[in-house]
Amino acid sequence: MKIKIMSKNVILYCRVSSDEQAQNSSLDYQEETMREYCRRKQYNIIDCYKEDYSAKTFVNRPEINKVMKYCKTHKKAVDLILCLNWSRYSRSAKAAYENLDYFKKLDVEVNTTEQPIDHHQPEQKLLLAIYLAQAEVDNDIRGNIPKREL
């Protein structure tokens, strides 16, 4: 008896919010890395959305809002929103959890290539919390350093 493996339908979400990030983790680099990951996993890429400016909340990000609308309009068409890492998804743990809840209600997983989380394992919630807090703390530190010291 052959077991058929269902391929996931994936939307790629790339994001940079500063010139420094654009150089160190460019949108093209993020997309290439995620496309290769999907190729290896045999995932079906539906689309790629690229966010290229700073916005502290998801409300102010036009591309993630397009992703949210697409997922809501096309129920069951998307299985996974894929980012490079959790800092590319959000640098606010509170905002990230709220947005993750939005996608969870639509039965859409959000995950990353560099810091994957198994959302079905309760202990992985701790790891997700660390990843989200790490991005927020890094953002807070950068915000408190005078520009000349960077």
Image (cartoon, rainbow, N blue to C red):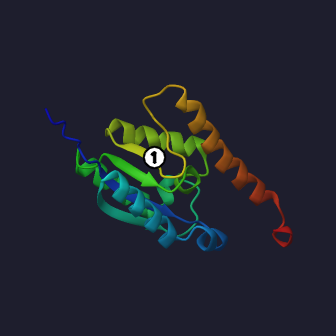
Relative to 63, does residue 115 appear above or below in the rendering? above
Relative height, residue 138 to residue 3 (above, below): below
Residue occupying image coordinates x 53% and y 52%: 114
Q: Please identify the quadrant where the N terminus is shown.
A: top left
Residue nearest the observer in this picture, 106 or 34: 34
- Considering depth in this image, is 106 or 29 the residue closer to the camera? 29
Residue most extreme to the left: 1
Farthest residue toward the top? Answer: 122
* Disc 1 residue type (three-letter): Asn
Name the image quarter holding residue 107: top left
Give the percent coordinates (x, y) of residue 17. Answer: 59, 66
Image coords of residue 93 (percent x, y):
60, 43
Q: Position of residue 27 (x, y in %)?
A: 50, 70
User: Looking at the rendering, in which quadrant would you find the C terminus?
Assistant: bottom right
Image coordinates of residue 108 in percent, x first then y, are 34, 42
- The residue depicted at 48 percent of the width and 52 percent of the height is 113
Badge 1 element? strand
Crowding at label 1, few (<14), some or many (≥20) Cα neighbours within 10 Å?
Answer: many
Counting labels gives 1
Q: In which quarter of the image is residue 11?
A: bottom left
**On the image, numbered disc 1 is attached to which residue?**
111
User: Which residue does the image show at 64% across and 74% down from the upper left?
Assistant: 19
